[in-house]
Image (tube, rainbow, N blue to C red):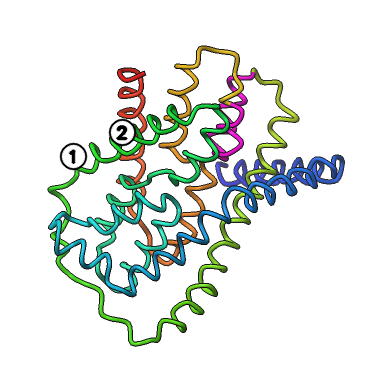
Amino acid sequence: MIEIFKKSFITLLFSIIIYIFLSNPSLIINSVNKGINIFVRNVLPSLFSFFVLTDILAYFNYFDNLKKIFRFKYSDIFVVSLISGLPANAKYVRDLLNNKMISIHDASIVMSSTYFPNPMFVLGVVSVFLNSFTSSIKILLICYLSNFIVYLFNYKSLSNNNSFNKKSKTSFFNLLRESIINNSNNLLVIMGSIILFSVITSILNNYLNLSDITTSILNSVMEITNGINLLSKLNINSKYIYILIIGALNFSGLSVLIQSFGILSPYKLNLKIFFINKLLIVLVSILIGVIVL
């Protein structure tokens, strides 16, 4: 009975989606163009450069040197996450998993508590939305602090991480070539997920009669760039807007989560560990935001 109900529900759902696509093609085309625009203007410039930069830093043993200096578990992942944000750090964690330098358990914890927003996105895009560079710095620091607190909470359960990358035998120019090719494939996956969620949010916004706050939060849950843009325009106290944006940045949006899991798709992270830590980080960041702001 349950199986029949499930099949009937899925059939009905996709029938409605097909009807929407056929009855309102301009909505779908505009939302696809909107997704492409978000990717080209906000995502591609920052992610592609950081993807390639991470490969270059690894080639020159930059992250191994950090481990030797700091002796802090997974200090390399922390630095990658701080300078490049998500989902670029997922690509680095996948490389560690490929080289058997991190366990699935540790990867699940570290990924959930180093899920920093891209600093270029916060200081560039979010500061424009809020019309305040100072506020964007505060928001970014709160995101860093809340993730670090939850990371320390899980610190004892992590392995020692004393292994180091083997020096690549390929030439530097071959490394650049392979990095550009491989990262272009990753970026195509990311662009596809952004377009998908742009279509979903456009359909929901068009067919559901929701309040401005509900619409903004729903869009933030789906796709963070447009969601934060809508949150910044809400006609409420600016402190509440900042707190909502802090929570949205730490949750990251389903679009970015799927981008990261797409990059890590060869490996099955522990989703229970991941999402419990994500929930803790969101709650901690909101609490810090209330205190600070």
> Residue furthest toward the front?
133
Quarter-of-image position of residue 161: bottom left
| Residue drawn where x is 37% and y is 29% of the image | 138
Quarter-of-image position of residue 1: top right
Q: Which residues are magenta?
A: 212-230
Give whichever of 134, 291 is nearer the camera. 134
| Residue drawn where x is 51% and y is 79% of the image | 177
How far apart marks 1 and 2 lie (CA) works out to 10 Å
| Picture layout, residue 4 above or below residue 134 | below
Q: Which mark is residue 153?
A: 1
The amino acid on which the numbered mark 1 sits, given as a three-letter code, is: Phe
Quarter that holds the C terminus: top left
Give whichever of 107, 134 is nearer the camera. 134
Mark sitting earlier along the chain (1/2): 1
| Residue drawn where x is 41% and y is 37% of the image | 250
Magenta span: predominant SS is: helix
- Of helix, strand and loop, which one carries label 1? helix
Which residue is identified by label 2?
Answer: 280
| Picture layout, residue 97 above or below residue 145 | below
The amino acid on which the numbered mark 2 sits, given as a three-letter code, is: Leu
Q: Which mark is residue 145?
A: none
- Of helix, strand and loop, which one carries label 2? helix
Image x and y of residue 13, in percent? 69, 41
Image x and y of residue 123, in percent? 47, 39
Q: Are marks 1 and 2 in contact (CB under 8 Å)?
A: yes
